[in-house]
Amino acid sequence: MKKIRIINLLLLAFIAGNVFAQQDGLQLGSVTVFPTLGLSYGYDDNVFYTSDEQQRLSSNFTIFSPGIRLEAEGEKTDFLAQYDYNKTSFNSNSEYDFEMHHILAALGYSASARSRVEVSAEYFDGSDRIGTANQQGNFLELGLDPDEWRSFGIAGKWHYGGIGAKGAIDLELGAIDRQYDNNRQYTATRDRETRYVGVTYSHKITPKTNYLIQAKHARIDYDIATLDNTETRLMFGAQWQATGKTSARALVGYLVKDFDGPIHDDFKGLALEAGMTWSPRSYSIFDLTLSRETDETNGNGSYVVRNSADLGWTHFWKDRLSTTANIGVSDENYKGDLRDDSLKYYGLSAKYQFTDWLMSGLGYKYYNRSSNINEFSYQGNTVLLTLELSK
């Protein structure tokens, strides 16, 4: 399953995700408070991600993104509470604005040097950008508001394995419920609940290399749509710190997506999760990620098979000045439908850290989606100037 990668979230992330200031926080007794405030101003020449020149809209936009994080750490317990808000407002028409509230709470308990338990709860409440998710293609002609949705999830994790131990086990389980609030004639079939469980075993081969065995199982139940299914994957791989300059983690295995009903074709095939970081110099970092996974459909077909790759390079020219360049490709095949998409993007951003609490960034991103169904093809350019205050 895909861990959500919607392009509109990258709107801010391609700069802000790489330019957060180093935070010391404000100490209030045993609690450390980390406040942040982000203000961005940008330009997008394809607001609706459309190939129709008559519907294509260019607009300036602003992003307002305050947040606060609370952390407390005791001898055996630690606690985290976080709230983030992100709103994108288009100058051309406020009807296209979209926003997201995010709340996270997590509690950790270390029973011993070997055993640690974590529980968490997470809530999202907001809207999708028009042209993404359920409103891809020619949905603009229907005059709909942005889709509004809520998501609530709970999760638990248990780690067993001390420092220097040959083996370690990580268990995880959780549930996520996602519900849409408007445009119900189109979104009611997207309401669903996901329950999952997983286990990863790590065994040390050398001081710098571990091999990994991972098994995961998820159950996806839809409220209305006949898309109920299970996902099961078995993965094998390794994690290593080859040198002080290179680290990597790779898992490859077999994934089965099995539908309850006979009207949808099942999937059986390769799954991949891989990431590598290479630092030829202490001030220059390359990151490579590769993946092959399945995802729930947004309306076309029964499900999506996605292959993706991303390469990024961050270089610190001075202590306070750095740049980041990235390029990525993704192929999305909609099973049970004729649709097949290919996405390409690249971007370049720079940041300057004026003080420990004030940062400014400037970035550019180009994106292009080519589809065998014309209404899903588009290309566009985004420029974004960011100012962030943090403590």
Image (tube, rainbow, N blue to C red):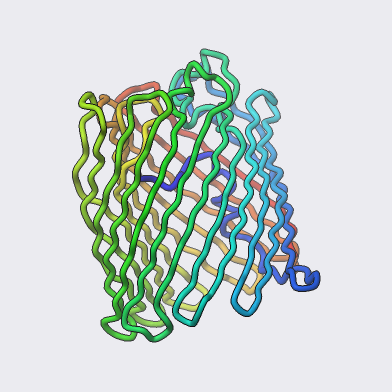
The image shows residue 236 at horizontal and vertical percentages of 24, 63
The image shows residue 140 at horizontal and vertical percentages of 52, 18
Residue 83 vs residue 315: left or right?
A: right
Q: Is residue 143 above or below residue 267?
A: above
Looking at the image, which is closer to me, 197 or 61?
Answer: 197
Looking at the image, which is closer to me, 322 or 140?
Answer: 140
Number of residue marks: 0
Q: Quadrant of the C terminus?
A: bottom right
Q: Quadrant of the N terminus?
A: top left
Q: Quadrant of residue 200?
A: bottom left
Q: Residue furthest front?
A: 111
The image shows residue 297 at horizontal and vertical percentages of 37, 32
Residue 104 vs residue 270: left or right?
A: right
Q: Residue at x 62, y 46 (%)?
A: 102
Q: Quadrant of residue 17?
A: bottom right
Q: Residue furthest right?
A: 28
Q: Residue at x 65, y 73 (%)?
A: 73
Q: Is residue 111 above or below residue 375?
A: below
Q: Residue furthest top?
A: 142
Looking at the image, which is closer to me, 363 or 217?
Answer: 217
Residue 196 vs residue 317: left or right?
A: left
Q: Residue at x 58, y 26 (%)?
A: 181
The image shows residue 220 at horizontal and vertical percentages of 37, 38
Residue 24 vs residue 150: left or right?
A: right
